[in-house]
Image (tube, rainbow, N blue to C red):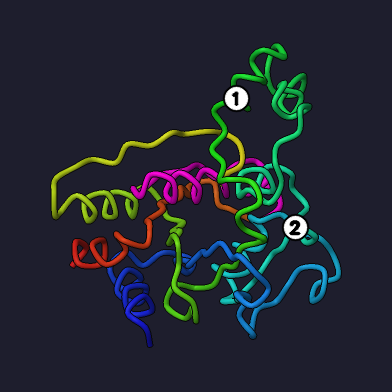
């Protein structure tokens, strides 16, 4: 058992979430893929959304790796930096006309969309934090509001600082993972329509994300 496995066990014991807190790691080469990892096209016969891979990890205890060829949803492809955003995306067409009133509004969303440097990573892997065989970049915890309260109090125990976050109705996997990596700070995210419709997120769930450097701090703060 690694220290991160132990932190996962302790977090579970303190807040009793309905699914496993998961470890998420961006991978740079095929050699970074755990030997026991399942992959969407190879093992499930289809591309999958990242929220579905997270659901397999948090609900069924699976270790799941995705590379570009496994991806179904375009937003994590851009957010995690597997490909650079296209002109079509930057101009706002990803949101307009289905989600915003104008192309300008869509471009505003695209401009603020959190994303990692394009080409740096080839994929990502997720697994229950208490069982992961790799060190996470981020721990992602699906929780209800009472459990979120405990998590916010736990992370503030050491320095008393509140969590600053950006909330969006889109791309929950990206908003849960990328800002925490870029800023090195905890984040709160809202399960998006894809997460609810395809991955079974509950109506009362929120997402709390903890960068690697603060997972131990959270575990200590909850006790």
Q: Mark 1 or mark 2, which is nearer the start of the sequence?
A: 2
Q: Is residue 142 above or below residue 83?
A: below
- Say which of marks 2 and 1 sits in front: 2
* Mark 2 neighbour density, 10 Å: few (under 14) some (14–19) many (20 or more): some
Q: Position of residue 220 (x, y in %)?
A: 20, 67
Classify residue 60 as left or right of residue 40.
left
Which of the 4 image quarters holds residue 88?
A: top right
Q: Residue furthest right?
A: 45
Nearest to the observer: residue 30 or residue 167 = 30
Q: Main secondary structure of the magenta part?
A: helix
> Which residue is pictured at 44% across the width and 73% down the height?
135
Q: Residue furthest front?
A: 119
Q: Which residue is under mark 1?
A: 109
> Which residue is pictured at 29% across the width and 74% down the height?
10
Which of the 4 image quarters holds residue 166?
A: top left
Q: Secondary structure at mark 1?
A: helix
Is residue 180 on the magenta stretch?
Answer: yes
Q: Position of residue 203 (x, y in %)?
A: 54, 46
> Which residue is pictured at 59% across the width and 65% down the height?
27
Classify residue 137 as left or right of residue 28.
left
* Mark 1 neighbour density, 10 Å: few (under 14) some (14–19) many (20 or more): many
Classify residue 184 as left or right of residue 207.
left
Q: Which residue is under mark 2?
A: 68
Say how many tags the image has: 2
Q: Position of residue 182 (x, y in %)?
A: 43, 46
Nearest to the observer: residue 146 or residue 75 = 75
Q: Secondary structure at mark 2?
A: helix
The stretch in magenta equals: 173-199
């Amino acid at each position: 058992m690694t220290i991160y496995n132990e932190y996962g066990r302790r977090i579970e014991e303190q807040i009793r979430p309905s699914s496993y807190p998961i470890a998420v790691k961006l991978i740079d080469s095929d050699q970074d893929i755990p030997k026991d990892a399942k992959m969407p096209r190879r093992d499930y016969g289809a591309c999958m959304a990242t929220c579905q891979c997270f659901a397999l990890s948090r609900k069924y205890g699976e270790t799941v790796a995705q590379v570009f060829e496994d991806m179904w949803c375009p937003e994590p492809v851009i957010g995690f930096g597997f490909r650079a955003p296209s002109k079509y995306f930057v101009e706002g067409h990803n949101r307009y006309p289905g989600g915003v009133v104008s192309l300008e509004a869509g471009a505003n969303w695209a401009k603020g969309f959190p994303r990692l440097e394009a080409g740096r990573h080839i994929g990502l892997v997720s697994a229950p934090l208490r069982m992961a065989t790799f060190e996470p970049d981020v721990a992602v915890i699906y929780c209800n509001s009472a459990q979120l309260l405990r998590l916010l109090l736990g992370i503030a125990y050491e320095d008393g600082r509140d969590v600053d976050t950006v909330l969006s109705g889109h791309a929950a996997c990206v908003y849960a993972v990328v800002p925490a990596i870029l800023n090195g700070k905890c984040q709160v995210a809202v399960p998006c329509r894809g997460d609810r419709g395809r991955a079974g997120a509950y109506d009362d769930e929120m997402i709390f994300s903890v960068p690697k450097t603060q997972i131990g701090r959270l575990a200590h703060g909850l006790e």
